[in-house]
Image (cartoon, helix red, strand yellow):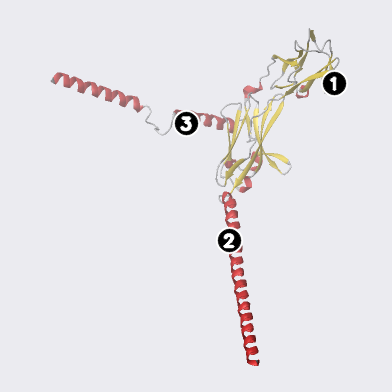
């Protein structure tokens, strides 16, 4: 028994030492989770990229890997009849094949096919049975736009390809915040722009954030090249307005708009106060009406009493005369 007891105690001691050694590596900051630690590293790297780039514009984030140009070939097809429009995002110089194709069950036979970009007619480069294709080489922003194929026989149908720089996912609804809070705006895109820029509407023009706000008022952070985050600290009513993020792609910029509304703490109470005021006015009017009605009834009662007294006195005079 003593040997068994001693063995158990030794095992427990070893387990205790093992647990202590494993937990010792995480004892530096028990309140910080792995996610918080990773986020701290991302934020520190982001701040370095914002303040350390060569541009003098503090409201610009530049990402040098996005400057590399690549030429890819993609094919996009619209089958008619059917959905007649297709949006295509183009972030860098590329070549695309645009194809209009007739459905096998289409009644449109031997159509005359014309391709156009705006009013400019383009000849198609390949022709297969019930299929017509043009090859578009995009090396600059002027080559973006809408390309339409017109198929004309006994009737005419068309299909349009819209080639544009990638859109930005912003926020359609206003950003509502209160005085003293931090306003947060996030822009994302599926592609990697060369740089991100932030602006604020100043009258009728867009002005860079660093021209409007002091540097300790805002931060521009980013988790990746495809995302940019603007934080405005200690909001005031003067910070209410329109803000814009801009992703700078090789083929041109893409923008997203934010509307920020900064409210005082008492602002949400205004509707309640208005209702209370309306109720108070209504109660006051009702009270005044009741007082007025009582006075009117009292005056009416006095008149009736006087009339009765007059009638009585008149009867008495008549009896005396008799």
Q: Is 23 on the left or on the right of 320, as rendered? A: left
Is 317 rendered above or below residue 235? below
- Which of these two is toward me, 226 or 276? 276
Image coordinates of residue 214 in percent, x first then y, are 61, 43
Count of number-bearing discs = 3
The residue that appears at 72% across and 27% down in the rendered structure is: 252
The residue beneath circle 2 is: 283
Seen as rendered, the residue at the extreme bottom is 321
* Label 2: how many Cα within 10 Å (few below 14, some 14–19, many 20+): few
Is 259 rendered above or below residue 314? above
Residue 120: numbered disc: 1
Measure the alpha-carbon separation of dots 1 and 2.
Answer: 73 Å
Q: In the picture, which quadrant includes the C terminus?
A: bottom right
Measure the alpha-carbon separation of dots 3 and 2.
Answer: 56 Å
The residue beneath circle 3 is: 36
Seen as rendered, the residue at the extreme left is 1
Quadrant of the image occupied by residue 297: bottom right
Q: Secondary structure at mark 3?
A: helix
Seen as rendered, the residue at the extreme top is 129
């Amino acid at each position: 028994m003593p040997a068994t007891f001693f063995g158990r105690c030794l095992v427990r001691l070893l387990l205790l030492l093992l647990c202590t050694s494993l937990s010792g590596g995480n004892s530096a900051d028990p309140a910080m989770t792995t996610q918080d630690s990773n986020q701290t590293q991302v934020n520190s790297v982001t701040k370095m990229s914002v303040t350390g780039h060569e541009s003098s514009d503090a409201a610009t984030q530049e990402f040098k890997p996005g400057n590399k140009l690549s030429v890819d070939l993609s094919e996009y097809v619209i089958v008619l009849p059917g959905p007649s429009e297709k949006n295509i995002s183009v972030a860098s110089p590329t070549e695309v094949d645009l194809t209009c194709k007739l459905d096998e069950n289409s009644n449109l036979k031997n159509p005359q096919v014309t391709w156009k970009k705006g009013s400019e007619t383009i000849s198609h480069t390949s022709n297969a049975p019930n299929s017509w294709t043009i090859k578009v080489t995009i090396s600059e922003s002027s080559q973006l736009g809408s390309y339409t194929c017109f198929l004309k026989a006994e009737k005419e149908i068309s299909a349009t390809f819209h080639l544009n720089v990638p859109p930005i996912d912003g926020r359609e609804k206003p950003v509502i915040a209160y005085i003293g809070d931090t306003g947060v705006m996030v822009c994302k895109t599926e592609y990697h722009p060369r740089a991100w820029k932030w602006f604020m509407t100043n009258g009728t023009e867009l002005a860079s954030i660093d021209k409007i706000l002091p540097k300790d008022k805002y931060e521009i952070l980013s988790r990746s090249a495809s995302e940019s985050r603007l934080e405005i600290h200690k909001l005031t009513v003067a910070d209410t307005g329109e803000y814009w993020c801009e992703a700078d792609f090789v083929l041109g910029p893409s923008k997203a708009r934010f509307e920020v509304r900064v409210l005082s703490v008492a602002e949400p109470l205004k509707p309640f106060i208005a209702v209370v005021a309306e109720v108070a006015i209504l109660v006051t009017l009702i009270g005044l009406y009741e007082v007025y009605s009582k006075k009117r009834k009292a005056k009416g009662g006095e008149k009736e009493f006087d009339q009765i007294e007059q009638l009585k006195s008149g009867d008495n005079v008549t009896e005396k005369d008799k």
